[in-house]
C-alpha cells in the first residue's frame, strides 16, 4: 500500500484553506481600524487627563488663567505636544508623548492637528473643541460617540 494523499484530498484541503482565508482577511482589516480608534481614544483620554493635571498645577501656583490651547508650539510634524506657555512664558509639557500628524491625504485614523481627528476608512473628520478647559466633540455625531465612549 502507498502512503500518500490523493488529488481529491489535496483539492479539498486547498478549498478549506481558501474558505478560512476569505473569512479571516476582512476581519483583520476591521481589527486594524478598531486599533486606530482605540489609539485615538487613548490620546483623547491622555489629553483630558493632562488638562486636568495642568489646571491643578496652575491652581497650586496661584495661576487661575484658563487653558486656551493644546497647540503644537509651531512644530509642524506633531499634532499635540505641549500646552500653551504659563504666565511667566515657560512652556509646560504635560503629555509624555508627542502625537504625530497625518500624512498627506491619509485615510488612516490620525490627528490632522490638535483639534481634528480623521477617522480610519471613511476619512471623515471629527472636530474637538477646547471650551472651559474641557476637550470635547459634538456627542450627537456617530464618530464622536465612537471616540468618546
Image (cartoon, rainbow, N blue to C red):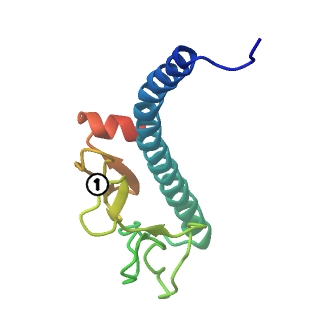
Quadrant (top left, top right, bottom left, bottom right) of the N terminus: top right
Q: Is residue 1 above or below residue 15?
A: above
Please tell me in which quadrant of the rendered image residue 7 appears. top right
Please tell me in which quadrant of the rendered image residue 143 appears. top left
Most extreme residue toward the bottom is 89
- Would residue 139 be seen by someone viewing this image from the given angle? no
For the point 58% across and 60% down, which residue is it?
53
For the point 36% across and 60% down, which residue is it?
111
Out of 132 and 149, give the one closest to the viewer: 149
From the viewer's perspective, tell me whether residue 142 is left or right of residue 82: left
Out of 13 and 117, give the one closest to the viewer: 13
Q: Is residue 104 above or below residue 125?
A: below
Please tell me in which quadrant of the rendered image residue 95 appears. bottom right
From the viewer's perspective, tell me whether residue 7 is left or right of residue 121: right
For the point 53% across and 55% down, which residue is it?
46
Residue 62 spot, x, y in % from top left: 56, 71
Q: Is residue 10 above or below residue 82?
A: above
Pointer 1: what residue?
A: 107
From the viewer's perspective, tell me whether residue 90 is left or right of residue 131: right
Quadrant (top left, top right, bottom left, bottom right) of the C terminus: top left
Most extreme residue toward the top is 1
Which element carries disc 1, helix, strand or loop? loop
Q: Is residue 86 above or below residue 101?
A: below
Residue 93 spot, x, y in % from top left: 55, 75
Residue 78 spot, x, y in % from top left: 42, 73
- Would residue 72 be seen by someone viewing this image from the given angle? yes
For the point 51% across and 72% down, which residue is it?
63
Within 10 Å of the Cα at label 1, are there few (<14), some (14-19), or many (20+) other Cα atoms?
some
Residue 128 spot, x, y in % from top left: 30, 53
Amino acid at each position: 500500500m502507498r502512503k500518500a494523499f490523493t488529488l481529491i484530498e489535496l483539492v479539498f484541503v486547498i478549498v478549506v484553506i481558501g474558505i478560512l482565508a476569505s473569512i479571516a482577511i476582512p476581519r483583520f482589516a476591521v481589527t486594524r481600524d478598531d486599533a486606530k480608534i482605540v489609539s485615538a481614544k487613548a490620546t483623547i483620554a491622555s489629553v483630558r487627563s493632562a488638562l486636568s493635571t495642568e489646571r491643578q498645577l496652575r491652581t497650586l501656583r496661584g495661576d487661575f488663567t484658563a487653558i486656551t490651547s493644546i497647540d503644537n508650539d509651531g512644530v509642524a510634524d506633531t499634532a499635540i505636544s505641549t500646552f500653551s506657555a504659563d504666565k511667566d512664558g515657560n512652556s509646560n509639557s504635560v503629555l509624555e508623548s508627542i502625537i504625530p500628524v497625518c500624512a498627506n491625504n491619509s485615510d488612516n485614523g490620525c490627528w490632522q492637528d490638535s483639534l481634528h481627528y480623521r477617522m480610519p476608512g471613511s476619512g471623515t473628520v471629527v472636530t474637538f473643541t477646547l471650551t472651559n478647559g474641557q476637550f470635547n466633540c459634538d456627542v450627537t455625531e456617530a464618530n464622536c460617540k465612537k471616540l468618546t465612549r
